Image (cartoon, coloured by chain):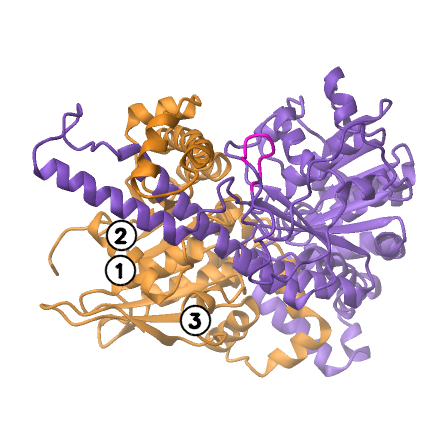
Chain colours: A orange, B purple
Amino acid sequence: MSTRDTDWDGVRLHVVTGKGGAGKTTVASALALALAAGGKRVLLIEVEGRQGIAQVFDCPPLPYEERKIAVAPPSETQPGGDVYALVADPESALLEYLEMFYNLRHAGMALTRVGVMDFVTTIAPGLRDVLLTGKAAEAVRRKSGGRPVYDAVVMDAPPTGRIGRFLNVTSEVSGLARVGPIRNHADTVQRVIHSPETAVHFVTTLEEMPVQEAVDGIAELRGMAGGGIQVGGIMINMVRPLELDPGQLRAAAAGSVDEHELALGLKAAGIDDSVRLAADLAAELTEHAVTAVGQEQQRRRLAEPGTPRYELPMISDGIDLGGLYRLAAALRDQGAA
Amino acid sequence: MSQEHSEPAAPRREADGAQGERAGRGGPQAGGRQHRNLPVAPPLLDVDRLIDDRRTRVIVCCGSGGVGKTTTAAAIGLRAAERGRHVVVLTVDPARRLAQSMGLTSLDNTPRPVPFTEAAGDDQARGGTPGGSLHAMMLDMKRTFDEIVEAHADPDRAAQILANPFYQSLSSGFSGTQEYMAMEKLGQLRRADEWDLIVVDTPPSRSALDFLDAPQRLGRFLDGRLIRLLVVPAKVGGRAYLKVLNAGFGMVTGVLTRVLGAGVLRDVQTFVSALDTMFGGFRERADYTYRLLRAPGTAFLVIAAPEPDALREASYFVERLAQEGMPLAGLILNRVHGSPAARLSAARSLAAAETLQAADNGSAAEGSADYGSAERGPHALAIAALRLHAERMQLTAAERRVSEHFTTAHPHVPVAKVPDQADDVHDLAGLRAVGDSFRSP
């Protein structure tokens, strides 16, 4: 399996975005596990300070520190890989940056005292973003003994509505800094993000608003100055299997369910009150069908951008580590990793 | 209850989410057995009473992203208008279809009338009162910021500020500007006093709490020490100020210059000194809005979906509102699933599906299936229905568990549940359907 092709072989920075509620953090985590399979080393970065990764992996809140949080399961032929996690906050990233480039870590206290930290991390537009994307770019480029420290970096990025601005580092900062060190830093980050080594994946459910946001977001990234940013896959999350064939589905959506047939089935299964129950279950079938027909429409819309799509099953009893592994396996089976 | 219904209100669903949600379509209610697990039952949130109460002047809808905040705000606005209130809905980032659903091709920084016509027959049933009106507007944060500047500075100075590169980034990019400007707009609408109810849909913040914090953060920045520090050189001129200030401050500007570059610092300084005269105004406006949020006519509604993340955010928000002394009306739980056949448990449903599947497999093996499709056994439809039902019952149970967690932690917070809509909401009828779940008990 180690030499098999995946859809994103050359990509080392996987940026995962999606509408709030679509399962962005879960899918980013599953993708990290999937990429780690086969003895790889993967860093999963969170940038929004929600401690979502810690919740997904059910571990205590994570610090600003690269820490191993999971292993990808080994197979018969290969060892398991490692997933590390980092919660990047702009303030820590700034202190690290000051230390790395200016040996100025001790300045942090004074900066905090007069409100520079507030300024840089929440107020100065773009600076916050460049610090966070900068951290991811640094992890991608970091080497030890001539080879990269991480085979891949997965970033649980801001939601679709903000992803364009978040990644459009240079133009964000250029409003602020036309020249100077921050600008140089931004340019470096920009090169990584615009390279073929970076891909932005969109997580969506089959609902109208998330799909619309994904389609808009894809267009936005492709249309960006400098040749755009590579769009990765569309991860269709929380897909429920269809229980009816297409003909039945259309009929049920139109409100036509054979209640008599249903009642006979219920009776055969030994259920009392089969006639009234059949009427109620028919109502449920119709709702399911209406939803399913709407979802089919959304699926067609997601095909329009022409980028690979991956379907991830609904894990109905809550995501635990087992559920994550299932999603990771689904991503690998479909060639996303 | 201030409203009379010409027909009995639909039976109010209890806290037990496993009941029929769609009145009229569901079968007989499974009365009597719903409390066998002694679910934690929160008080019911009576949204109709809230919107019928003329003393309610501002309703703030908050919650994390993706929980249906905008839709809820619009549905509340529409319902209140149909019940005779003069309503303006202030939304921050509506989906295009939602704007269309309100009959608006586009929304800008000005309240636009929403043409809603009540179906005459429904009017009574809905408990509607004629004479209401509905406006909607979408926040344009840059425009709003510009207006503040224009209102507080003389024309020359205003032009100078508006042209400053740092101001341009700040007014369109600062992560808290949207929150701040939403609050500012709310204050303006309240002062204008043209509407008797303002419904605010808060910005899609990464965390619900940003909404309360961001305005203060901007305020703190604008009259904080950093600003004063930055203003000094522009006022004093030259670098003499370094002697006046202590060494720590000098070092800070030194670091800023090295990291940001001198050009950035100059833009910020120019901006800040131009804005200097407006600081008092900013602080005053922020304080006014903050006081407004704590006033008796304001009600906060926390919106969530019955999912762990959304309810965790809701929990934080509830605690935070209590800390700030802000009036919480309750929690609206969106997209709650239910079943008209809740009397059939998931386990029994699955078992029945398996029984039928085994029977179908048996008859297929005997080659006796005379049904058209080879894959489709005689009980295919019932099997599908039973599996779907089991899945829905599991989902319902999971939703109930997470909402019970919330209620255990906040037993006094009233809750209103909005049933999941099979189709996406994108017209007035859809908004009305959502609004119907706010019917008083």
Q: Please, is residue B217 above or below residue A240 in the view?
A: below
Q: What's under tag 1, amino acid-wise?
A: Ala
What is the tally of numbered marks visible in this picture?
A: 3
- Kindly indicate whether the residues beneath marks 1 and 2 are on one polypeptide chain: yes
- Name the residue carrying label 1: A34
- Name the residue carrying label 3: A58
Q: Residue at x 20, y 33 (%)?
A: B377
- Kindly indicate whether the residues beneath marks 3 and 1 are on one polypeptide chain: yes
Which disc, if any, is residue A78? none
- Name the residue carrying label 2: A331
User: Of the residues tagged 3 and 1, which is closer to the observer?
Assistant: 3
Question: Is the residue marked by circle 3 packed among few (<14), some (14-19), or many (20+) residues within 10 Å?
Answer: few
Q: Is residue B308 visible?
A: yes
Secondary element type, mark 3: loop
* Rendered location of residue A270, percent (x, y): 33, 44
Circles 1, 2 touching at the beta carbon (< 8 Å): yes
B26 in the magenta segment = yes
Q: What's under tag 2, amino acid-wise?
A: Leu
Start-end of magenta stretch: B20-27
Q: Residue at x 82, y 30 (%)?
A: B83
**Disc 3 versus disc 1: distance between alpha carbons?**
18 Å
